[in-house]
């Protein structure tokens, strides 16, 4: 349960930083995800529901954003908390929808892989590829490529952005 929540919180933290164009330190994202996973355990253990559960979830997301993002203005911080919660809801909703579809057919994928294992390794792979993307991004020498294509005798020029393989890196912004 901890590992699945850690992976989900890490992905939500990274996605939020990408949406807001925040420079994210992965050490801070890891600490944020650890806090979020610990909070999930506390939430389940103490059965935080209703208004108390809602308030505790908001406070937890504020603390998680404070851990993950180093922002100078209050407005930017509030925006990060709002976007963090929206991304978390969308991500959680997508996982719930996926889980419902898979559980309606079977608890196992191809009768051999448990669903929780699939979700765990999906999160782990995203974590690894995100970390690798940061390293590979530093190795990328060229940020764009010009390509000329000829179609029916007409020449057309295109400008493509280089990518690390898993992180869309826009060299213009």
Image (spheres, rainbow, N blue to C red):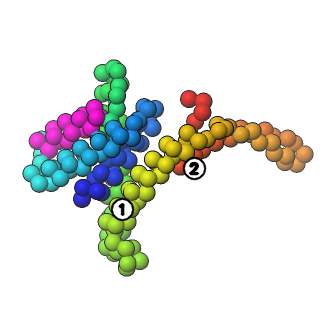
Residue 158: percent from left, percent from top? 74, 39
Compared across the picture, whether 65 is left or right of 42 comes to: right
Disc on res. 129: none
Disc 1 element: helix
Quadrant holding the N terminus: bottom left
Is 72 located above or below residue 162 in the figure?
Answer: above
Report which quarter residue 78 is drawn in: top left
Disc 2 element: loop
Whether residue 89 appears in this view of the structure is no
Report which quarter residue 106 is drawn in: bottom left
CA separation, marks 2 and 1? 22 Å
61 in magenta: yes
Residue 138: percent from left, percent from top? 55, 39
Labels 2 and 1 touching (C-beta < 8 A): no
Is 99 located above or below residue 55 in the figure?
Answer: below
**Badge nearest the viewer, 2 or 1:** 2
Is 121 located above or below residue 69 in the figure?
Answer: below
What residue is shown with label 2? 165
Compared across the picture, whether 46 is left or right of 113 comes to: left
Q: Residue at x 49, y 43 (%)?
A: 134
Q: Residue at x 33, y 38 (%)?
A: 28
In front of the other: 141 or 120: 141
Q: Tell me which segment is drawn in magenta.
A: 52-67
Q: Residues within 10 Å of mark 1 (few under 14, many from 20)?
A: some
């Amino acid at each position: 349960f901890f590992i699945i929540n850690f992976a989900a919180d890490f992905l939500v933290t990274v996605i939020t930083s990408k949406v807001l164009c925040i420079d994210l330190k992965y050490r801070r994202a890891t600490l944020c995800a650890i806090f979020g996973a610990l909070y999930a355990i506390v939430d389940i253990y103490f059965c935080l529901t209703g208004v108390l559960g809602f308030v505790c979830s908001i406070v937890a997301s504020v603390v998680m954003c404070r851990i993950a993002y180093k922002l100078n203005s209050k407005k930017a911080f509030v925006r990060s908390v709002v976007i963090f919660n929206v991304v978390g809801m969308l991500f959680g909703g997508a996982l719930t929808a996926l889980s419902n579809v898979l559980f309606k057919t079977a608890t196992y994928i191809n009768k051999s892989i448990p669903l929780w294992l699939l979700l765990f390794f999906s999160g782990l792979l995203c974590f690894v590829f995100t970390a690798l993307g940061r390293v590979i991004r530093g190795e990328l020498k060229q940020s764009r490529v010009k390509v000329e294509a000829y179609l029916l005798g007409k020449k057309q020029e295109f400008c493509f952005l280089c990518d690390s393989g898993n992180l869309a890196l826009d060299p213009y912004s």
